[in-house]
C-alpha cells in the first residue's frame, strides 16, 4: 500500500464542519474511518475500521476491516490499523469530540498514548500533540492556550502571557487557561503534551 504522508482518522463524534476543521481535512491525503463512512469533503477512503456495532451503511468491497474484540474502542482499532499499514504516516484526528463526554476523554487518552506528533481537530479548536522534546508552534497573540499532560512531567513554554518555566504538571488543570503573547510558542516537555488553542478569540 502506498499510504500518504498524512492520514485523517475520522471517529463518530461531531462532524468536521468548521473552516478550521475543513482546512485541516484538506491537507490529508486519505482517511481511515471508525465504523462509519467518510463525511462530505473527506479525502479518499483507505479503510473503515471497527467492530461494526455502529456501522449504518454498506461499505465498498475491500474497504472494511472488522475487529470483534471489545477491550478497545473503534478509534484504538483504527490507530492500530494505521500503524500496521501506514507506519510512517502522520495521523490527524477528526470527530473525536462533541458527543458523549466519556468518549471524548477516552479518545483523547488513546491519542495521547501514541506519543506521536498529531493534531485533534474539533468544532471549537485544536489540540496539537507533541512528543517529548523541544518544539515550536504558531499562536495567535492574545489567544487562549492550554497545556495539558495526561502524565506527570515538567514543562517549559515561552511566548505565553503567564510564565511556564520548569512547571510540574501534576494535574490536568495545572497549565491551562493561559494566553499567547507572541506569534510563536516554544516548548520543552519531558513527556507527550497537548497544546490546545481555540479557533477564535474568547
Image (cartoon, rainbow, N blue to C red):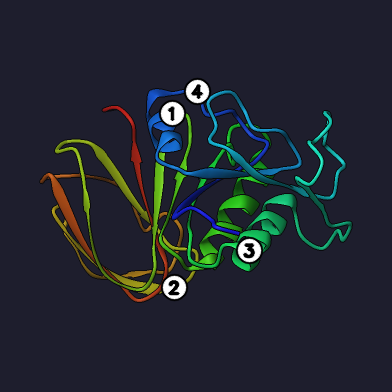
Q: Closer to the camera: disc 1 or disc 3?
A: 3
**Residue at numbered disc 2:** 152
**Residue at numbered disc 1:** 22
Seen as rendered, the residue at the extreme left is: 182
Q: Position of residue 126 (x, y in %)?
A: 40, 41
Q: Is residue 78 left or right of residue 151?
A: right
Q: Closer to the camera: disc 2 or disc 4?
A: 4
The alpha-carbon separation of the residues under discs 1 and 4 comes to 6 Å
**Residue at numbered disc 4:** 17
Q: Earlier in the sequence, mark 2 or mark 1?
A: 1
Whether 57 is drawn above or below 147: the answer is above
Q: Determine which of the numbered discs, if any, sits on residue 85 in the image.
A: 3
Under tag 3, what secondary structure? helix
Asked if the residues shown at circle 4 and circle 3 are in contact, with their CB atoms under 8 angstroms apart, the answer is: no
Q: Earlier in the sequence, mark 1 or mark 3?
A: 1
- Quarter of the figure with residue 103: top right
Asked if the residues shown at circle 1 and circle 4 are in contact, with their CB atoms under 8 angstroms apart, the answer is: yes
Amino acid at each position: 500500500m502506498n499510504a500518504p504522508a498524512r492520514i485523517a482518522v475520522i471517529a463518530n463524534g461531531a462532524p468536521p464542519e468548521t473552516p478550521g476543521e475543513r482546512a485541516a481535512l484538506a491537507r490529508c491525503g486519505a482517511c481511515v474511518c471508525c465504523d462509519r463512512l467518510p463525511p462530505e469533503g473527506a479525502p479518499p477512503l483507505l479503510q473503515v475500521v471497527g467492530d461494526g456495532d455502529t456501522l449504518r451503511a454498506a461499505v465498498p468491497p475491500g474497504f472494511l476491516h472488522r475487529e470483534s474484540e471489545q477491550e478497545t474502542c473503534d478509534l484504538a482499532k483504527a490507530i492500530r490499523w494505521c500503524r500496521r499499514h501506514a507506519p510512517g504516516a502522520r495521523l490527524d484526528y477528526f470527530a473525536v469530540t462533541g458527543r458523549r463526554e466519556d468518549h471524548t476523554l477516552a479518545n483523547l487518552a488513546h491519542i495521547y498514548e501514541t506519543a506521536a506528533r498529531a493534531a485533534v481537530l474539533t468544532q471549537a479548536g485544536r489540540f496539537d500533540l507533541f512528543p517529548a522534546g523541544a518544539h515550536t508552534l504558531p499562536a495567535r497573540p492574545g489567544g487562549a492556550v492550554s497545556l495539558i499532560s495526561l502524565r506527570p512531567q515538567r514543562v517549559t513554554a515561552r511566548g505565553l502571557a503567564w510564565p511556564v518555566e520548569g512547571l510540574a504538571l501534576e494535574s490536568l488543570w495545572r497549565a491551562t487557561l493561559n494566553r499567547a503573547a507572541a506569534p510563536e510558542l516554544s516548548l520543552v516537555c519531558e513527556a507527550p503534551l497537548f497544546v490546545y488553542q481555540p479557533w477564535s478569540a474568547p
